[in-house]
Image: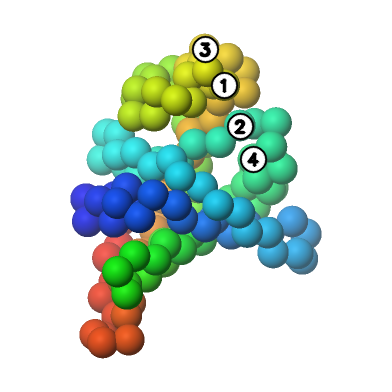
Amino acid sequence: MQEVYDFLKAAGTYYLATVEGDQPRVRPFGTVDLFEGKLYIQTGKVKAVSKQLQANPKAELCAFMNGVWLRVAGELVRDDRIEAKQHMLAQYPQLQAMYSAEDDNTEVLYFKSAEATFSSFTAPPRTVKF
């Protein structure tokens, strides 16, 4: 999982796919954190992505860097603990102007039953499960 985190952190931007009914939705994200042995992302509860994940927690993200792409598929589970939110926001101080661990909007989610696949045109795919 550390390798997945390191890749996402270095890439800076990844794209998260969710579904809304039968319509796929994809948007750029930039937050990623390792907390208590789990891979987390962050958003706001008022956003459509949050509502989509609560209706259907299956999601996939994709990032590309230096000729390698990473796909992570799994379920995203909301963690309402202040400690998890504080840990995420400590990694991204610029978000503290918009989010707080104590507000009712900040949402952190961790991957459950995830499968990460590193791929390129020059090497066979490699999969990590967590």
Residue 6 position within the rendered picture, expressed as x and y whole percent measured from the top left: 25, 51
Q: Secondary structure at mark 4?
A: helix
Q: Amino acid at mark 4?
A: Ser
Task: Quickly name the residue at label 4.
Answer: 50
Give yes or no for contact between labels 4 and 2 (Cβ–Cβ under 8 Å). Answer: yes
Q: Is residue 62 above or below residue 46?
A: below
Q: Amino acid at mark 1?
A: Met
Q: Quadrant of residue 113?
A: bottom left
Nearest to the eye among marks 4 and 1: give it: 1
Depth check: give the residue in front, 6 or 22: 6
Q: Amino acid at mark 2?
A: Gly
Which residue is pictured at 26% across the width and 40% down the height?
Answer: 37
Task: Quickly name the residue at label 2.
Answer: 44
The answer to whether residue 117 shows anywhere in this view is no
Label 4, label 3: how many angstroms apart (C-alpha)? 18 Å
Q: Is residue 116 above or below residue 113?
A: below
Give yes or no for contact between labels 1 and 2 (Cβ–Cβ under 8 Å). Answer: yes
